[in-house]
Amino acid sequence: MQLLTVQETNAVVATRHTEAMVTGNAAVLDDILHPEWVNHPIQFNEGPGIEGFKRKSLWLHEHFDFQFDHQHVESLGDFVLIRSLVSGTVRGEFAGVDLAGKPVVFTTLEYHRMAEGKIIESWHLQDYYGMLVQLGAIPNIMNAQVNPYPGWE
């Protein structure tokens, strides 16, 4: 049996950060987030700390059937960078409109700082603009290519 290096272990832990959104099991966050974890920025439907992120993760799971394709994971010392393609469908109502079954695809970048085998600090960039345009919630005023992301697939 081959043992993982600290960097390999950090990468495995960091990729589990999205697991609660996919499975609806928010308790997994207790295993991977350090008690002093800080999220940058705190986003919609999220309060501070682990409990706030649990609420947001469960809200996302209730509204979307997401899958995360972690297309690039890079572990550099105490930091892990993850580039992902997120795809899925809306589970029902979103932003006051019944969008059940409507597909969505968008990209994310995550940067996590690790301490004691857990994530202690996270920075996130999600293409929520592309997601909202695809869902018809906002017009594509930037005329951006929002679906699909052919360069990422």
Image (cartoon, rainbow, N blue to C red):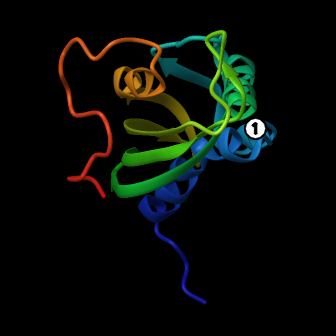
Q: Is residue 77 left or right of residue 34?
A: left
Q: Is residue 90 left or right of residue 148?
A: right
Residue at 51%, 50% in the rendered image: 68
Residue at 71%, 34% in the rendered image: 91
**Residue 36 sits above or below residue 66 on the image:** above
**Residue 95 sits above or below residue 30 on the image:** above
Give the quadrant of the C terminus.
bottom left
Residue hosting label 1: 30
Nearest the eye: 37 or 89: 89
Give x and y (percent) for residue 150: 24, 52
Instruction: Inspect this view and state whether residue 116 appears.
Output: no
Q: Is residue 22 left or right of residue 27?
A: left
How many numbered circles does the render carry? 1
Does dot 1 land on a helix, a strand or a loop? helix
Give x and y (percent) for residue 32: 66, 43
Nearest the eye: 71 or 116: 71
Nearest the eye: 126 or 17: 126
In which quadrant of the rendered view does residue 124 lie? Answer: top left
In which quadrant of the rendered view does residue 66 lie? Answer: top right
Q: Is residue 119 left or right of residue 76?
A: right
Give the quadrant of the N terminus.
bottom right
Q: Callout 1: few (<14), some (14-19), or many (20+) C-alpha neighbours within 10 Å?
A: few
Instruction: Inspect this view and state whether residue 4 appears.
Output: yes
Q: Amino acid at mark 1?
A: Asp
